[in-house]
Image (tube, rainbow, N blue to C red):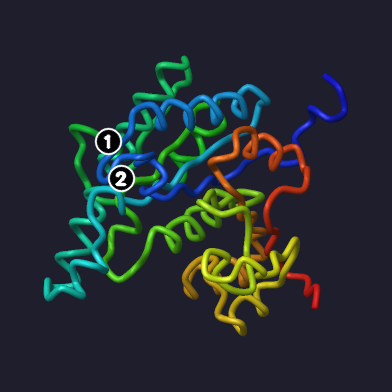
Amino acid sequence: MGEEEKPVYGRILLKLSGEGLMGSEPYGIDTRVLREIAEQISEVHKLGIQIALVIGGGNIFRGVSAASGGMDRSTADYMGMLATVMNALAMQDALEKFGIPTRVLSAIDMKEVAEPYIRRKAIRHLEKGRIVIFASGTGLPFFTTDTTAALRASEIGAEVLMKATKVDGVYESDPVKNPQALRYERISFSEVLNRNLKVMDATAISLAREEKMRIIVFNLNIRGNIRKAVLGRQVGTVVEETSYA
């Protein structure tokens, strides 16, 4: 194996948005996009990296939006958690079509479709080469899947949290509204919080900072970005403890 093929991380947590599974569809899951993402993950898995996933549920149901429309927040959040289970099962199916053993671990007990989330069991699955998908968020309302990703990454001892998004990193302002917006290659947690940059929610960023968990934000729609990130190449924006101001 050439030097460029050696990953710099042994265990990662990859955070995917539910919207990333929609593709060009207005709702739900585009199976073509699902397969493409699964294929990219399978390529990284072949490098010997232990991979855990957290997938949002916004393509099916967004609890915050429902709550803003008058639904009880706890009820809306639980419905959003169930949406993440649907996405997790879809991703499990797609990954296993590439021959990768995959386990879905749910924070809400539903033993007919997923294993219960147990930290030691999750780590054991990873050590055996299985991809682990964490579903149902934290199992509690008022916490986002971003926070779930930071929490689970810390619990399993992941070396990096990779957030795959629709944009190619963290910008000083919305690049859609401001085409001249500066993109950061590296930025500290404090700067993200102080500038109120929309990387992840504040709870997730605070947890990652406390645990010194590096975050890489990159564009999922550019094929090969996941592989580049795990090989240590410059992709998107790195958020970590050291200040780059």
Q: x%, y% of residue 3?
A: 87, 28
Q: Quadrant of residue 217?
A: bottom right
Q: Residue at x 25, y 45 (%)?
A: 27
Position of residue 20 measured from the top left corner of the image (x, y, whole percent): 42, 45
Extreme residue in the bottom direction: 194
Is residue 26 depicted above or below 112 in this figure?
A: below
Tag 1's secondary structure?
loop
N-terminal-most mark, 2 or 1: 2
Query: Where residue 222 is drawn, which disc sits there?
Result: none
Res. 123 in view: yes
Residue corresponding to mark 1 = 114
Q: Gap between marks 2 and 1, in whole Å?
A: 6 Å
Q: Amino acid at mark 1?
A: Ala
Q: Amino acid at mark 2?
A: Ser
In this rendered view, identify the residue nearer to me: 200 or 81.
200
Q: Residue at 43% x, 39% y: name it.
A: 121
- Marks 2 and 1 close (CB-CB < 8 Å): yes
Q: Could you tell me which secondary element the residue under label 2 belongs to?
A: strand
Residue indicated by mark 2: 106
